[in-house]
Amino acid sequence: QVQLVETGGGLVQAGGSLKLSCSASGRTSNPMGWFRQAPGKKRVFVAAITGTGTITFYADSAKGRFTISRDMFKNTIYLQLNSLKPEDTAIYYCAATAGTLNSLNAREVDEYDFWGQGIQVTVSS
């Protein structure tokens, strides 16, 4: 079992930055990812990282603006959000999988077995 807790969300102006953190307990070498869900919309993939932290995957909307990373010693992954836009406003969820991730499955919600409670990110225009 893996427990995930997200921190770091909040309100920021367009063009600003935030850094989200997700602390994991239990089995902590799992591949992990970030998803987001805007009001009235489906949960969608943002970024993911392998268990060793050597390979990352990004949604097109995140490439060039967001960076996912992990600290194995702190059992924590991060999502650095730069150049934020109002359309980035959503609840951001951290997730972990008991399996492996690749370019085909990393963006699939059903590939992930454990989820955090989510954290709000609001970008004002």
Image (spheres, helix red, strand yellow):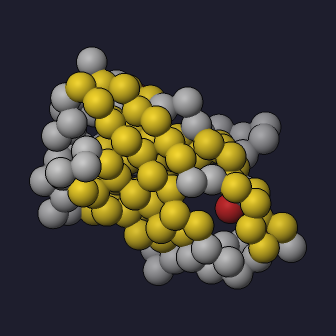
Q: Where does the C terminus fall, quadrant-wise?
A: bottom right
- x then y, percent, for residue 30: 21, 38
Instruction: Answer with the quarter of the image where residue 47 lies.
Output: bottom left
- Residue at 62 percent across and 43 percent down: it is 119
Question: In the image, 28: left or right of 52?
Answer: right
- Residue at the spot 29% in from the left edge and 30% down from the top edge: 25
Q: Choose top left, top right, bottom left or bottom right for residue 112.
A: top left
Task: For the N terminus, give its image quadrant.
Answer: top left
Residue beneath the point at 44% across and 29% down: 115
Tell me residue 18's x, y (percent).
59, 67
Quadrant position of residue 85? bottom right
The percent coordinates of residue 72 (x first, y second) are 18, 52
Residue 109 in sight in this render: no
Q: 31 and 74: which one is in front?
A: 74
* Number of marks in picture: 0
Q: Is 36 drawn above or below residue 13 in the view shown? A: above
Relative placement, left or right, of 122 versus 46 is right
Q: Is residue 20 above or below residue 64?
A: above
Residue farthest top in this picture:
1
Q: Residue at x 70, y 81 (%)?
A: 15
Task: Please state which of residues 110 and 8 is positioned toward the viewer in this rendering.
Answer: 8
